[in-house]
Image: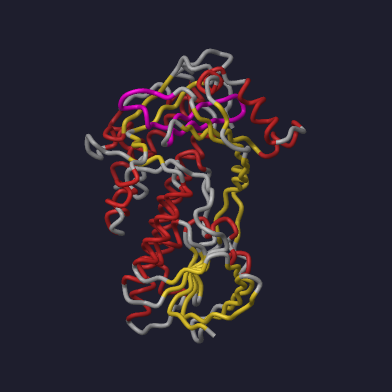
């Protein structure tokens, strides 16, 4: 039987970050990853506040050497392309050169996993976790299978970073679905499609389609990642396959069609279910949930990687402090972690609710920097998950303005009537 201080289930950004912190603190750490890296994953667009995490994990130069596409902001575009709301991250008070990376996740995630290994974490890939027993008073026990061979692992604590599989959330019946954010995404990559130029070349495009929205993310080697997000119920009602739905949605969007027209699709279509959910609790005796294993947000504002890494970092720090002090890993030890993580996600959920609610386009596509409102909105979209009191007030003003405008119609939708339709 193998014995460790911490077993981390999952080697994605949350698990790799957490294991990196634990291993650097001197704890014997094991990552159990069911796949073989590099492996394909969606979520290529990062946020500027990721840079702080990269510095902490000593990844800055590693990522610079990859020469990923640089992203200085984003464009929200009407379906036919006549109205565009562009923002630059510097407008969020992050500095004139604030940027993020657009990454191929198969490369990016592999770099994080290798960095954790270089810091001392043991990595077992192609390993399935079959059963987990957690406790604060005795070692946690995991039954795992590698290459058809079963074995047992003991650890003082377990970190669930298994993503949407949420292994421990299922074992402990913790999953809570968000009733109004039940989406699916269909996506692929195209080479030779139209790209923007200059400073905006690396920016993500969010296109407000008819009953859906599209992303266009520029990657290296003249490749674009393009996807459409739609209500699962609406997709099922069409009776179309995912590929047929993508093509139908593409034809309904003059802007996206024009961008992809000269491009050639490089791979098959992929699908991902975006069932937004939370958990009744993020920790228990002997275990912690991090990243998507704890809570999953709609991908509209590219928060997946930053929340995964931020939660992994804090979980690793709290767990390392607890174990190195000789304290039992009880749920009460992890309450500050859960409180902080919930606060971050609630702030982003509020903006996602506004995006899918009525009247978002009227206000967002007609920006007015009333009392610094634009700054606060952009800072949140740049990954400032825990804004100060003044920016919280500004965000409340933004949401209030949307509600009041829905009632009084002070600000008309700037889009042509045929494009001013709900996007979700």
What residue is rendered at 49% in x and 77% in y? Answer: 286
Examine the rendered structure and indicate whether residue 257 appears above or below residue 122.
above
Q: How many numbered marks appear?
A: 0
Report x, y in % for residue 46.
40, 43
Residue at point 64% right, 37% down?
A: 231
Q: In the rendered structure, does residue 203 fall within the stretch colored magenta? A: yes
Image quarter hosting the N terminus: bottom right
Q: Residue at x 49, y 38 (%)?
A: 300
Is 269 in the magenta?
no
Q: Is residue 245 left or right of residue 2?
A: right
Q: Nearer the viewer, residue 123 or 240?
A: 123
> Residue furthest toward the left?
96
210 or 259: nearer the eye?
Answer: 259
Report the quarter where the C terminus lies.
top right
Q: Coloured how?
A: secondary structure
Percent x, y of residue 58: 28, 58
Q: Give the residues drawn in magenta, as a range.
A: 195-219
The x, y position of residue 419, in whole percent, is 56, 18
Relative side of 421 to 362, left or right: right
Q: Position of residue 298 (x, y in %)?
A: 53, 43
- 29, above or below 355, in the image: below
């Amino acid at each position: 039987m193998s014995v460790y201080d911490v077993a981390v289930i999952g080697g994605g950004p949350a698990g790799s970050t957490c294991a990196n912190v634990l291993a650097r603190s001197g704890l014997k750490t094991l990552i159990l990853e069911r796949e073989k890296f590099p492996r394909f994953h969606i979520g290529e667009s990062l946020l500027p506040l990721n840079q702080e995490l990269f510095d902490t994990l000593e990844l800055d130069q590693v990522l610079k050497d990859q020469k990923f596409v640089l992203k200085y902001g984003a464009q929200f575009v009407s379906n036919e392309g006549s109205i565009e709301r562009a923002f630059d991250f510097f407008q969020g008070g992050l500095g004139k050169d604030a940027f993020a990376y657009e990454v191929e996740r198969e490369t990016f995630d592999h770099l994080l996993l290798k960095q954790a290994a270089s810091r001392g974490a043991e990595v077992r890939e192609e390993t399935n976790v079959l059963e987990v027993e957690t406790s604060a008073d005795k070692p946690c026990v995991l039954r795992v299978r590698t290459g058809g061979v079963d074995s047992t692992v003991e650890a003082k604590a377990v970190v669930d970073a298994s993503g949407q599989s949420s292994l421990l959330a299922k074992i402990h019946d913790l999953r809570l679905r968000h009733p109004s954010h039940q989406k699916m995404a269909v996506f692929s990559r195209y080479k030779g499609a139209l790209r923007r130029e200059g400073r905006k070349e690396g920016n993500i495009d969010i296109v407000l389609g008819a009953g859906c929205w599209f992303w266009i993310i520029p990657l290296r080697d003249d490749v674009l990642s393009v996807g459409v997000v739609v209500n699962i119920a609406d997709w099922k009602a069409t009776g179309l396959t995912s590929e047929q739905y993508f093509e139908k949605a593409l034809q309904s969007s003059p802007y996206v069609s024009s961008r992809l027209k000269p491009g050639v699709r490089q791979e098959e279509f992929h699908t991902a279910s975006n069932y937004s959910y939370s958990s009744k609790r993020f920790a228990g005796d002997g275990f912690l949930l991090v990243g998507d294993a704890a809570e999953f947000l709609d991908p509209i504002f590219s928060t997946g990687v930053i929340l995964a890494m931020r939660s992994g970092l804090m979980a690793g720090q709290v767990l390392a402090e607890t174990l190195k002090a000789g304290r039992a890993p009880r749920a009460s030890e992890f309450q500050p972690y859960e409180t902080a993580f919930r606060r971050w996600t609630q702030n982003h959920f509020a903006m996602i609710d506004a995006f899918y609610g009525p009247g978002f386009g009227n206000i967002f596509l007609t920006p007015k920097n009333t009392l610094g409102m634009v700054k606060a909105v952009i800072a949140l979209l740049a990954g400032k998950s825990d804004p100060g009191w003044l920016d919280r007030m500004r965000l409340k003003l933004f949401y209030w303005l949307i509600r009041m405008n829905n009632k009084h119609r002070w600000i008309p939708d700037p889009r042509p009537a045929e494009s001013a339709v709900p996007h979700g």
